[in-house]
Image (spheres, grey):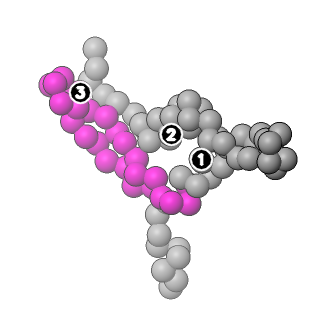
Amino acid sequence: MELKKLMVDTKEVWVDFPGLSGFSVKVANLSRKELNKLRKRCIAQKFDRKSRQVIEELDEEKFVKEFSAAVVQDWRRLT
């Protein structure tokens, strides 16, 4: 038996949303591996004319959307 096979990439839990009674959100805790994959998808490469080098920039808006979609799994009892 190997310990690598027992590791779970994400853990999910139901959390009660404060302020709205009965409303729960299922959120996931992403592993470092999954978070790095998500970050790599949101990096854009740009050419800097002053230094004449390629610079990697994180597209923050895209990252927030991707991160939110990956973390919020489900919700219940919202009317």
The type of residue carrying mark 1 is Leu
Disc with the residue nearer the chain's start (2 vs 1): 1
The type of residue carrying mark 2 is Phe
Q: Is residue 25 magenta?
A: yes
Which region shows up in magenta? 10-34
- Quick check: marks 2 and 1 in contact, CB under 8 Å? yes
Horizontal and vertical percent for residue 52?
Answer: 84, 47
Residue drawn 31% across the image and 28% down it: 76
The type of residue carrying mark 3 is Phe
Q: CA distance from mark 2 to mark 1?
A: 7 Å
Q: Which mark is residue 23?
A: 3
Horizontal and vertical percent for residue 42?
Answer: 64, 41
Residue 3 located left or right of residue 59: left
Tag 1 residue? 38
Quadrant assignment for the C terminus = top left
Tag 2 residue? 67
Residue 60 position (above or below residue 9): above
